Image (cartoon, rainbow, N blue to C red):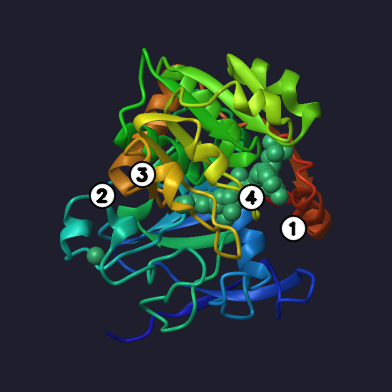
Amino acid sequence: MSKPVCYSTKAYSTPSASSKLGATMIERRQPTPTDVQIQILYCGVCHSDLHYARNEWHFTQYPAVPGHEIVGRVTATGSGVQKFKVGDTVGVGCLVDSCRTCPNCRSGLEQYCNAGMAGGTYGGTEKHLGSPTLGGYSQSIVVTEDFVLRIPANLNLAAAAPLLCAGITTYSPMRHWKVGPGQKVGIVGLGGLGHMAVKFAKAFGAHVVLFTTSPGKVADAKRLGAHEVVVSTDEKQMAAQTGSFDFILDAVSAAHDLNAYFNLLKRDGNLTLVGAPEKPLPVAAFPLIMRRRSFSGSLIGGLPETQEMLDFCGQHNITSDIEMIRMDQINDAYERMLKSDVKYRFVIDMASLT
Ligand code: NAP
Ligand code: ZN
Ligand code: ZN
């Protein structure tokens, strides 16, 4: 395969774990016959962007351009593109490709591709150029049409951007564990993921309990759909919930005590971890073995389920609660994210980069 011709586009990148992000120019491939070129209008800011920019997962490739909650408008299509045309409103999430042949890819579970995360929107491998993939903190991106998603027309575009990661990451495990009416469901952490989880659990008909370390978020959690809110630093409030949950989704970005949450599950209850803190979280045996409780993880979602989630959001008018920022506010936004001071997702207005 010959290398495609490239063009330059503006972006924000960081050269090292200890540097701030700043303006730069990056190269994107010109669309090949199966590619869609997208002008990025908005990009959500995921805590994974921060983990990645600061090499907290120890696999960052520098210079790094984060961003995987991308929405924009199609500006060009390759000659063989069937599903999209210039002017369409589209989204790109955490994946821009996968091997497409392994059993997981064939099942539409591309996030679990046996080739790993080579198809990641950032930190993967650009198949055509052989270089690291660069994310959505930029003016444009070129993506193979099979990894481009449709955004329902009734949704506010900026508020829909976080659905591409925070949305699917919380929707997918709740579908897998069949969250629905008659169940008591806990959500741990009211951040970008957590606030989407509250909205989905409510929409699926469950009784929703939100756990937060921030007493100032109690009223918001109720407004977002939680039936009960527990301040997790209050031992009495925690003890009152012992043994009562069918399912708990943990969306915390930092070190915390998982065992305290296992104790809140019923017999055969499950806790699924989607948060990806830098350091390992200790798991004690007894809280799990006492009531045959289970502990699992979940990674974003595949392409078919991501489109299903977007369509569900279109039908139920679900989007993210966002705070719009300019591109040059990204470093401050990261600092605020570390202080749990986000209501409830930063979204970059990419017009601020031009
Ligand atoms: P976020 O917006 O920063 O939210 C994280 C929330 O966790 C905070 O708002 C806070 O909620 C709580 N929290 C923070 N520090 C805490 C601590 N020390 N103890 C207890 N709670 C704490 O982050 P996000 O974008 O939602 O991402 C959350 C995590 O999920 C990150 O680690 C991210 O990398 C990961 N992630 C995983 C996937 C996946 O596929 N599995 C996808 C996307 C993101 P309260 O103020 O309510 O306590
Ligand atoms: Zn993310
Ligand atoms: Zn695969």
Camera-nearest residue between 255 and 176: 255
Q: Position of residue 294 (x, y in %)?
A: 35, 43
> Circle 1 sits on which residue?
353
Q: Which mark is residue 82?
A: 2
**Dot 2 crowding, Cα within 10 Å, few <14, some 14–19, many 20+:** few
For the residue pair 310 and 336, the one nearer the viewer reads as: 336
Mark sitting earlier along the chain (4/1): 4
Q: Earlier in the sequence, mark 4 or mark 3?
A: 4
Q: Earlier in the sequence, mark 2 or mark 3?
A: 2
| Residue 67 to residue 298: above or below | below
Q: Is residue 345 visible?
A: no
Percent x, y for residue 212?
A: 68, 33
User: What is the three-letter code of the residue carrying label 3?
Assistant: Ile
How far separated are the C-alphas under marks 3 and 1? Answer: 52 Å
Q: Which residue is mark 3?
A: 289
Asked where in the image residue 149 lies, by quadrant, the reply is top left
| Number of other residues with Cα within 10 Å of mark 1, as a class: few under 14, some 14 to 19, many 20 or more | some
